[in-house]
Amino acid sequence: MDTHTIINHTEEVNELLARYGVKFGLYKNGTFKEQLFPFDMIPRIIEKDEFDYLDKGLAQRVLALNLFIKDIYSDKKIIKDGIVPEEFVYAGSGYLAQCENITPPRGVYSHISGIDLVQGKDKAWYVLEDNLRIPSGASYPMIARELCRRSNPKLYMENHIMDNRNYAQLLRKTMDYVNTGGHTVILTPGRYNAAYFEHSYLAEQTGAHLTTGVELLVENDHLYFVDYSGRKEKVGAVYRRISDEYLDPMNFNPESVIGIPHIYDIYRKGNVALLNAPGNGVADDKGIYYFVPKMVKYYLNEEPILMNAPTYLPYYEEDMKYVLEHFDDLVLKDVAEAGGYGVVFGSSMTREEKEKFIAMLKNEPRRFIAQEVIDFLDLDIWDNGEMVPRKADLRAFVLMSDKPYVWKSGLTRFSRNPDSFIVNSSQGGGFKDTWVLCQ
């Protein structure tokens, strides 16, 4: 691969991304701002054998997580058998009592899973986080690859790269698998949502209707899409891109103006599929993350293929002791935060900050996890005319229908700050394409 040939198209591709509106939105101090998601032309390259390993590990993990969600909202065997403490389930913000004893169509809970991984300098892969609520990001490498292919088609003919254009097909297969009869729609909060570009792009790519809550109506125990002329058409699957609490004002937050009244009532009756299922947050809580390897053994009777980052729960006395003794060597994460927020490094705190944080940790041990700081593998990016190394992660996407399908691509995010491990777009990060080699 000729890196300099690729770099020559950087400005062209980023201009096209801007023209297509490839942006993400941020609310800061009560103001909505949109900004471009910077794209680096130098791809992350994953060898076939290496991705085959990731494929097996990701599929295994998502299967176990789906079984966990099903168990928690039904028999709760994993709690009764003492594998996961019940307070870790019921005290988490993602647990919804309204989901008890509800089985979604085809028994699928996490239809689209975004699993965040990092590769250490020892070349080992570690799972950092499981995103099972509304994971976003697949649209960015999809459109970036398309624009790169247009700008330099020869590059993709000369290199043996897995084609990533099948994401829309995988997503449509997932939608159709659980559809209860009728149209499939993508439910967006609207133009001012941070991921609106993705909502519209995926609707275009899958052939689903892009709708807001005002265009959907529950009537006679079914959901209908109401078009501009007032005609009603039945809907069988909703890929909803709004949070649980705003989905239905009659069942969740009564102040929601973006949800659909009574949609949860007909979901409960099995008359519509909701992707992802409400209540999935019970399984992607950062505290629950600690138990995922145990879930793999418990539900599948298999050894976990992928490793968690070494993690400690201050909830346990032994782990609390370790965290206090090695505080400066750890990263502490608030289990209720996301998007790179609520992450602090023990080594970066002042003495006063440490004392205050430790007091909070002792008072609210369920609120935090502690992890060893993994020295991420650096990836080269092109920055201001020079090649520089930056920390990067990988969000892999697993789509569930008759079985889990791992997309042979992914969203590689990198930090633009040389001193930061935080790669999230909301924290100023950029993204790369991810090349999975065929051979």
Image: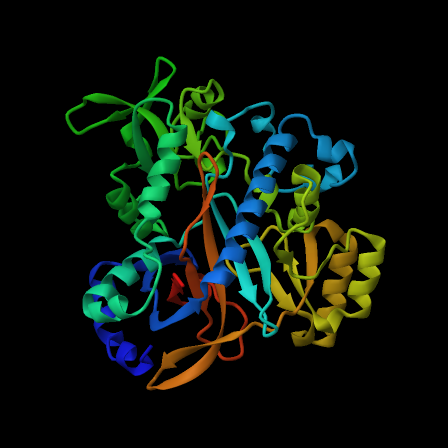
- The number of numbered badges drawn on the structure is 0
Q: Is residue 32 visible?
A: no
- Residue depicted at x 75% and y 53%: 365
In the foreground, 52 or 102: 52
Q: For the N terminus, which image quadrant?
A: bottom left
In the foreground, 28 or 417: 417
Above-or-below relation of 136 to 4: above
- Residue 238 spot, x, y in % from top left: 37, 32
Q: How is the image coloured?
A: rainbow
In the picture, measured across the screen, residue 291 lies left or right of residue 383, that is right
Q: Quadrant of residue 421?
A: bottom right
Q: For the C terminus, which image quadrant?
A: bottom left
Q: State the residue lying farthest toward the top.
A: 220
Q: State the residue lying farthest toward the bottom.
A: 386
In the picture, measured across the screen, residue 76 lies left or right of residue 189, that is right
In the foreground, 427 or 151: 151
Q: Quadrant of residue 412?
A: bottom left
- Residue depicted at x 69% and y 40%: 301
Q: Is residue 217 visible?
A: yes
Above-or-below relation of 266 to 398: above
Above-or-below relation of 284 to 341: above
Above-or-below relation of 92 to 121: above
In the picture, measured across the screen, residue 134 lies left or right of residue 344, that is left
- Residue 415 spot, x, y in % from top left: 47, 72
- Residue 318 spot, x, y in % from top left: 85, 57
- Residue 245 spot, x, y in % from top left: 49, 36
Q: State the residue lying farthest toward the front.
A: 439
